[in-house]
Image (cartoon, helix red, strand yellow):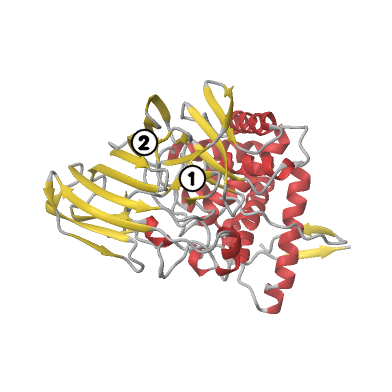
């Protein structure tokens, strides 16, 4: 996700100095079959069938599913929206979700389930027998969801309906337990593995739908349109509905779409998205999906990434708008194809996406921003942040904390986006441009459709440069980088 930061300007020249498991053969994918209907009054009725494959090395007695929509309910312990952003997120006043799980079955038989987690955020499904490694089990969950009126990942505005994290999705199993983090307001509190999707979505014909994946066909009946969508090897599935105009183009063999409701220069946004897909494909590895959609929508932050689809806030325009498109497109590589635990290691995808955005401007002229200017802005902003907060004993500059342990969104943004990008720039300057770019290609290829850990990135850099880099990374990650100003 992109949260816009205000660059802090210093009347000095700033210099920076330092005081001194890749996936193997591809596993069989879990498959989701979703049949959903969106009504004109923003009620979602859905059935999700999850053909779950136990790709873990231990048997399982239960499965757990994230119930992300519950975070928007009245009385939630962890709201997705901090109090300071409430008026922007709810311009028409507070509005809440209502999630009602109707039935749950396992292999066709009713199952014992409990809603658990620290914030009613987990659906725990008991299995009739132990699920051994490589075995399948089919879980069907029927539910209804009243959408909140909110400018966020899940909700509707007067112009669009955002449907992200709207269905129960299987929790990742790691280190002997399911990862069941609640919907923290700081960062992107999501962690999932790639799966295959077959989705049938019905919505009012007054809307145009944009989706993760490919629309295989669509049909109209009365005032409703039904879309059949497929998506392979994606980390999750999202959709946006609205009264949109659409322009399209090609980035290699990939179709690139731009959906907008208020944009006097839609070709600019489309061309930026096409350039980003081409640039990152050449720098890191080919974009693996047949389609990519950029969607203008109501959102309190700059943008949000999903596989094959990114949301861009309609609160922005011009150069800033295009910059957000570049950042969110970079996430197709870092989070989308190469996954990571976004709560535990937020810098891993955000730092890479932000530095990839800087690198984009090295390869593409004609934009307001340049690599040098973006880097200087980041360095200046980080210097001022450290002088203002850390030097007064008010801040922590470590990057190894989970997202919920950052003091606020400002600290999170500086540590994951800004400092993450500066760290990668320092690594690049240390090992050289050729080794750095080779390492990113290797990191992408080795972890494609898998889940990466920080050591996977460090290892790729070490192998490409034939240097030991743990101390360099640790100095940044642990918060021990020393910054100096010179006049």
Q: Nearer the viewer, residue 9 or 462?
A: 9
Could you tell whether 17 is left or right of 49 in the image?
A: right
Q: Is residue 270 above or below residue 132?
A: above
- Please indicate, yes or no, whether residue 287 appears anywhere in the rendered image: yes
Going from N to C along the chain, the mark reached first, 1 or 2, is 1
Q: Quadrant of residue 265?
A: top right
Identify the residue at the far front of this view. 222
Could you tell whether 193 is left or right of 252 in the image?
A: left
Residue at horizontal 74%, vertical 47%? Answer: 374
Q: Could you tell me which secondary element the residue under label 2 belongs to?
A: strand
Q: Quadrant of the C terminus?
A: bottom right
Q: Quadrant of residue 229?
A: top left
Could you tell whether 221 is left or right of 135 in the image?
A: right
Q: Nearer the viewer, residue 462 or 148?
A: 148
Q: Which residue is tagged 2? A: 201
Across and down, in percent, residue 172 comes to 33, 52
Tag shown at residue 161:
1
Across and down, in percent, residue 236 comes to 40, 43
Gap in Å between the C-alphas at discs 1 and 2?
Answer: 13 Å
């Amino acid at each position: 996700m992109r949260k816009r930061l205000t660059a802090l300007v210093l009347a000095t020249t700033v210099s920076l100095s330092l005081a001194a498991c890749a996936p193997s053969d591809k596993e069989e994918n879990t498959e989701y079959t979703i049949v959903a209907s969106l009504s004109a009054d923003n009620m979602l009725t859905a059935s999700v069938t999850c053909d779950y494959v136990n790709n873990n090395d231990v048997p399982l007695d239960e499965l757990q599913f994230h119930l992300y929509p519950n975070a928007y309910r009245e009385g939630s312990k962890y709201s997705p929206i901090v109090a300071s952003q409430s008026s922007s997120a709810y311009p028409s006043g507070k509005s809440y979700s209502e999630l009602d799980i109707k039935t749950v079955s396992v292999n066709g038989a009713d199952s014992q389930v409990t809603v658990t987690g620290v914030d009613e955020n987990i659906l725990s499904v008991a299995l009739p027998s132990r699920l051994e490694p490589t075995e399948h089990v089919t879980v069907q969950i029927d539910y209804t969801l009243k959408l909140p009126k909110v400018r966020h990942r899940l909700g509707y505005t007067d112009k669009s309906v955002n449907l992200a994290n709207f269905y129960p999705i299987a929790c990742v199993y790691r280190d002997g337990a399911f990862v069941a983090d609640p919907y923290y307001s700081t960062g992107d509190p999501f962690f999932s593995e790639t799966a295959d999707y077959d989705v049938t979505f019905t919505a009012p014909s007054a809307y145009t739908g944009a989706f993760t994946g490919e629309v295989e066909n669509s049909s109209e009946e009365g005032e409703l349109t039904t879309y059949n969508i497929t998506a392979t090897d994606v980390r999750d599935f999202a959709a946006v509905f609205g009264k949109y105009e659409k322009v399209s183009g090609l980035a290699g063999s990939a179709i690139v779409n731009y959906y907008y409701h208020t944009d006097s220069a839609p070709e600019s946004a489309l061309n930026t998205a096409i350039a980003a897909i081409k640039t990152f494909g050449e720098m890191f590895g080919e974009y693996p999906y047949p389609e990519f959609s950029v969607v203008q929508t109501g959102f309190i932050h700059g943008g949000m990434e999903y596989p094959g689809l990114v949301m861009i806030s309609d609160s922005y325009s011009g150069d800033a708008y295009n910059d957000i498109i570049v950042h969110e497109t970079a996430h197709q590589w870092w989070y989308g194809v190469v996954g990571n635990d976004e709560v535990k290691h937020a810098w891993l995808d955000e730092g890479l996406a932000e530095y990839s955005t800087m690198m984009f401007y090295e390869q593409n002229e004609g934009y307001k921003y340049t690599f040098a200017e973006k880097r200087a802005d980041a360095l200046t902003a980080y210097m001022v942040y450290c002088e203002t907060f850390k030097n007064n004993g008010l801040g922590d500059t470590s990057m190894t904390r989970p997202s919920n342990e950052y003091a606020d969104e400002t600290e999170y943004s500086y540590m994951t986006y800004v400092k993450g990008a500066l760290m990668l720039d320092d690594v690049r300057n240390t090992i050289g441009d050729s080794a750095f770019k080779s390492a990113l290609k290797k990191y992408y290829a080795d972890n494609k459709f898998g889940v990466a850990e920080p050591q996977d990135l460090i290892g790729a850099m070490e192998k490409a440069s034939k240097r030991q880099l743990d101390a360099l990374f640790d100095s940044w990650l642990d918060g021990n980088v020393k910054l100096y100003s010179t006049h």
